[in-house]
Image (cartoon, coloured by chain):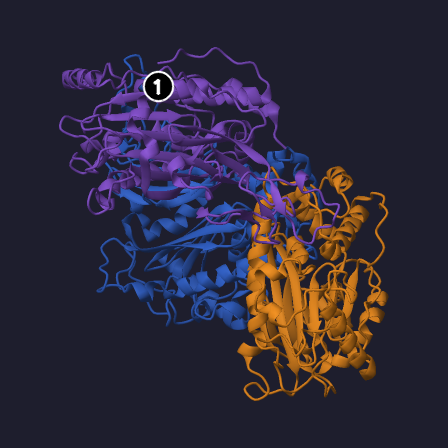
Chain colours: A blue, B purple, C orange
Amino acid sequence: MIDRDRISRLLAERREGFSLPQAFYVDPALHEADLKAVFETEWLFACNSCEIKRPGDYLTLAVGDNPIVVLRDRDGGVRAFHNSCRHRGSRICGKEKGRATRLVCPYHQWVYELDGSLLNARQMPDDFDRGEYGLHPVHVEVICGMVYICLAQSPPDLARFRAGVTPYIAPHMPDRTKVAFEMTIIEEANWKLVIENNRECYHCAGNHPELLVTLVEFALPDDPRGPAQFKQLMDAKTAKWDALGLPHKPADGGEEFRCIRLPFHEGAVSFTGDGGPACRKLLGDFTEPDLGSVRMFRAPNNWNHFLSDHILHFRVLPLGQDRTAVRTTWLVHEDAVEGVDYEIERLTEVWIATNAQDAELAEVNHRGIRSMAYRPGPYAPSEFMLTHFANWYAGKMEAFVGAPSPVRIAAE
Amino acid sequence: MIDRDRISRLLAERREGFSLPQAFYVDPALHEADLKAVFETEWLFACNSCEIKRPGDYLTLAVGDNPIVVLRDRDGGVRAFHNSCRHRGSRICGKEKGRATRLVCPYHQWVYELDGSLLNARQMPDDFDRGEYGLHPVHVEVICGMVYICLAQSPPDLARFRAGVTPYIAPHMPDRTKVAFEMTIIEEANWKLVIENNRECYHCAGNHPELLVTLVEFALPDDPRGPAQFKQLMDAKTAKWDALGLPHKPADGGEEFRCIRLPFHEGAVSFTGDGGPACRKLLGDFTEPDLGSVRMFRAPNNWNHFLSDHILHFRVLPLGQDRTAVRTTWLVHEDAVEGVDYEIERLTEVWIATNAQDAELAEVNHRGIRSMAYRPGPYAPSEFMLTHFANWYAGKMEAFVGAPSPVRIAAE
Amino acid sequence: MIDRDRISRLLAERREGFSLPQAFYVDPALHEADLKAVFETEWLFACNSCEIKRPGDYLTLAVGDNPIVVLRDRDGGVRAFHNSCRHRGSRICGKEKGRATRLVCPYHQWVYELDGSLLNARQMPDDFDRGEYGLHPVHVEVICGMVYICLAQSPPDLARFRAGVTPYIAPHMPDRTKVAFEMTIIEEANWKLVIENNRECYHCAGNHPELLVTLVEFALPDDPRGPAQFKQLMDAKTAKWDALGLPHKPADGGEEFRCIRLPFHEGAVSFTGDGGPACRKLLGDFTEPDLGSVRMFRAPNNWNHFLSDHILHFRVLPLGQDRTAVRTTWLVHEDAVEGVDYEIERLTEVWIATNAQDAELAEVNHRGIRSMAYRPGPYAPSEFMLTHFANWYAGKMEAFVGAPSPVRIAAE
C-alpha cells in the first residue's frame, strides 16, 4: 500500500532549510509510512522508570496500532512486550498503569509470567507447547530514568545518546524521583508539527506569556540575536555551573538529539509563575536551586527539562495523520511531600498553559498546510533545530525507501 | 477495488484450528469483501415475524449500506424490499418500526403498494410507466417465526436449516409470542469477533458471573471436560425431554448452523438471577418449565435461545470494519401480561449484563489484534465452534474469490 | 489518485433527465474529483460585500481543504487570499469574521498588508526577499453585493452572469443592506443533493408547510401544471412590475444560472408566517412591498431571494462526500432598526424551518442512494432545473477528464 517511489519523489522535492512538502504533514498515506519508517524502527521514549518502581508495576501505551506494556520484572529489570495475547490476540493489560503479579488475559485467562513466558493456558490440550506462546518482546533501554522502547527486530545503537546525555542528567538523580502529576492532551495536528513547534522559540514571544516569565528565548549560548544582557547572564551562570561541576555546553547530538544547560531569566530558578522554586525539596543532592534547566530532546518523540527542583518529560505519539497525543509528566524528589514541599497547581500551571497554547498553534498550522496554496517556507535562523529535525526525518524516510542520502548540514 | 488475489493469498495463509490472519479482522478492504462475499449473498436473520403481525406493520434494518424494509403484506405474507425510492433514491421508511397502509416516500410522495408495486407518482408525465418502477424485492423466508432475508439474486438453499431446526423450535410456538423488550448495542469490534465471542463459553468463567448462575459451560452432551455431575444432569434432563417428545441431540448443521437442547444448572429453568422462571406464562402448550434451552445459531449473523418461558434472538450486523450492531429481542407468550406474568427487569437483566461484558471482550480483542505482533493463535478444544465458523467463513470467501476449497473438518 | 477513466465511464452511463449514477453522490473518490473539477475551477459565492464594509473587515471560509480570507482593502476594494502563512503554512485568520489593520500570523507574527504583501517577517536574515512571500491571491468579483471567488489560475468568464442578473437585483440595492441574521447548518448529505433539493418545489407540498403559506410552487410563468388562478396571479403581478420597470421574465442563464421574478400567493409579500412584510423599512427606494421575489441561483453553490423588504443568500460548501455546510444570511436595509423595523424571529422563522426540513430530506436521500438497489430515476417535468444542474455538472466533469461533451438540452 505504501508507494515508495512517490515518497522518493517527495523527498527529492524537499529543500533543506524549508518546511516539508505538504504530503508529509497531511497525507494519510505518508502517515502510514511514518509509522513504518520511524515509529516501528526507532527508539521511542515510553515512560519514566520511577513510574514502574516495584516488580509487577506496569504501564501501557500504543505505538500506532501496537499496544505495548512496559513493566518491572521480578529481578527489578524493565521489560516491554507486545500487549496482545498469543491465544486470539486480545489486549491483555487494559489500564494505563497497574500492578500485577502475573499478566492474565481478561478473555480466557491465559497467564503470563513477568518475563513474558506463558505460565498457564487452561483447557488447552496436552500436546500444547506453552514454550511457543510467550509474549513477543519489545526492546528496552533505560537511560537516566528514561525508558526507551524499540519495536524493530534490530534496534539502532543508543550508545552515543547515552554517553552524550548522562553527564547532564545524572546529577539530577531521576532514579530518586516520583511522578507528581501527569497529563495527556490530544492535538489535532500531525506529530511532526508538534515536534517542530517544540524545536523553536521563535513563536514564544507572541504566544507564551506564562512561559516567558522565566524562559530565555535564546537556544544557543552564543546566540547572535542575544543582547549584551544575555551574554552577561550566560557568563555568570556558566561560571557557577562550572564551579559545581555541572556540564552546560551543547552535547554533540547531531540531528539525533540535543542536550544543553541554559539559564532562566535573572532571579528565576524554575518554571513557575514568579520564577521561584516549584518544590522546596531539591532533586538529588542539590543545595543550589539556580541550575537553569538541562534542555534535552531526542528525535522522534520526546523533549525534556531537568531543573534543580523538578523534571519535565514530554512524550509524543501519533494517533493518526492529524491527531497526536502529548503526555507530560512532572517528577519531583521521591521524598517530597505534596502540600508541604510542593503544590500541584504551582508546579504545573506554566506548562499546562504552554501546552494548550502549543496545541492550538500546531492545530492551526496543520489546517493551513492543507491549503492548495501551501508551499514549503523558509525556516528562520532561530529555527535551526527544525532543519535538524527535517534532515533527520528525511534520512529515516530515505533509509525506508532505499533512496541515497543527500549531504547533511553540520551539527550546530 | 477488492483485490481478490490478495484475499486468496490470505486464505492460503490461514491455518485450520487457528484464529484468522490479521487482515480479516482489522483491514477495511477486507470488510468491503465481507459485505460482498457474505452479507450480500447469504441469508441473514432480520427480525421476528411477531414484530410485524398485522398487514402494514414494517421493520427496517441496514445491511451494510443497504436500507431494507421488511413488512407484512395485505395477504398476511412477509415481504422485504430495498428501502430506496425508485424516483431519486430517497430512503422511504425512516423509523425502525412502524405501520403503513402503503409506503409513501417522504421526499415526493411516490406511493408504493405493500407488494412493492408503484401505485402513484404524482406529476409524472403521461408516458411514465409505473410498472417499471416498483421497489426492488429482497428474498424472504420465515422459519419458526424467524424472518430471514437474502440480498442475492439467487439465494442459497435453506431447506436443510429449516428441516434441521424446526423440530426443536416449533414446540416453543414462536408464532404465539410478542416482543417484551428489545435492545441494540454497538460494539467497536469486527463482526467476526462478535460471532467468535458467542461461539464459545471458554471465556464465561472469567467474565459472566450473572450468566453462570444458570448456564452450564459445556456445549456438548458428552463434553470430555464435563465432570460426573454434568453427566448425571444430562442423563436426568434428557430422560425427561425424551418423555415429553422434545428433541435435544445436536442437529446435523455442519458448519452452517447448530441446534441442540442443553440443561441449565440443577434447579434452574431460565436465564434469571436465581434460575427461577422469567415469565409465569409458559410458551406454547408447555406445562413443564424445566426444558433447558434450545441453543441455536446460524452463520453468519444470529444466535438464539428457546426456553420454556421466553425466547432470545441475537442479530449481528456489521456497521464497519470495527463497528458492529447487536440487537437482542426478548419474546414471551403473546398473552403474557407485563407486571403480572413477567417483569422487564427480571426478564432482561442477565443478558443485558452478559451482552455488555461480551461487547467489552470483543472490543479489547479487536484492539489487540491490530498489533504487528498478532499471529493467529490456536483455538482450544472447547472452541471447536470457532473452527466451524472460520471454515464456513473461509468457504464463503473462497467462493467469492474463486479459489479452490481446501478439505474441511467433519461436523462435530 | 483520481481515476479519470472511471469518471469517464460513469459519465457515459449517465442518462439525461435521470438522477446521476450512484458513485457521483456517495463515493469519496468522486468527491475528490468534485473538489478539483468544480470547486477549484468555478466561481463560488463567498459572502456579501456588506459583511466586509470597512477597510480591514474580513471573513473566512474553507473551500474543501483551502482556508480563504476575503477582505476589504484600504482602497475599498474587495480582495481574497489563501489564508495560509508563507512561512510554515499556518492558518492566519482564525475567526469567521473580524477586523484587522494588517493580517498577522498568530504563529510567528509575520505581518501582511491588506493587499497581501509581506510587510514584516521578524528574525529573518538580511537576504530574505519579502517580495517573494506575499499571500497567494484568489480571484474576486463583486456582482450586486455578492462576492464571488475563484481558486483557478484562469477563472471562467462571469460577464453573462453579471449582465443577466444585474437588472433584476440592482433595484434591491444590496449595497445598502446589512446582515440581520446568519446561520450555518451542516447536512449529512452530498452537496449535489443539497443543490438538487433546492432546484425543485416538487417536494414542497409534502414537506414545507411554513414556506407554502407564501411561496407559489410553480417555477415557470407559464407552468403547464398551474391552475387558472396562477395564470391570473401572474398576469396581475407582472402588469404591476412592468409598470414599476422591474424585470420578471426568466433571464437566459442556460445551465449556469437562473434569474426570474415570481409572485407570492395573493396577499403575501414576504417569507413570513402570515405573508405580511418581515421588515417595515423596504430595500433601496422601494415604496411598493408587493414585488414577489427575484429567485436567483447559480451553479454550483448558491441560491438567493431578493424581496421588497429583505434578501436571502444561501451558500453551499462541501465538507466531505457526505457532509455539506449551508450558510444562510438574511439582509435588510442598512438603516432598518431591529425591534422597530423588524424582529429577528419573524424575519427568519420560515427559512429556519424550511432549511431544517430540507436538511432532513437531503440526508434521507443520501442514505437511500447508498443502496445497491439504487438506479438513477427519472426527473419529473417540474424537476427540469435538476436536468440543467446535472448537465452543467457533467459538463464540468467532462472538461476535467477531457471527455467529449454530449449534446445538451436547450435552456428552459
Say if residue A138 shows up in the picture: no
- Secondary structure at badge 1 equals helix
Total numbered circles: 1
User: What x and y, as percent, mark residue A248?
Assistant: 44, 56
User: What x and y, as percent, mark residue B305?
Assistant: 30, 30
Q: Out of A70 and C144, give the one closest to the viewer.
A: C144
In the picture, residue A243 is in which quadrant?
bottom left
Q: Out of A217 and C217, give the one closest to the viewer.
A: C217
**Which kind of residue does numbered mark 1 sit on?**
Phe
Say if residue A361 shows up in the picture: yes
Residue at the spot 61% in from the left edge and 63% down from the top edge: C326
Q: Residues within 10 Å of mark 1 (few under 14, many from 20)?
A: some
Q: Kindly identify which residue carries mark 1.
A: B384
User: What x and y, as percent, mark residue C176?
Assistant: 71, 83
Location of residue B25 with respect to B356 vertically, above or below: above
User: What x and y, as percent, mark residue A28?
Assistant: 58, 44
Going by the image, does A323 lie left or right of A24?
left
Going by the image, does A40 lie left or right of C202?
left
Q: Out of A73 and A134, give the one closest to the viewer.
A: A134
Residue at the spot 38% in from the left edge and 18% down from the top edge: B164
Location of residue B50 with respect to B160 vertically, above or below: below
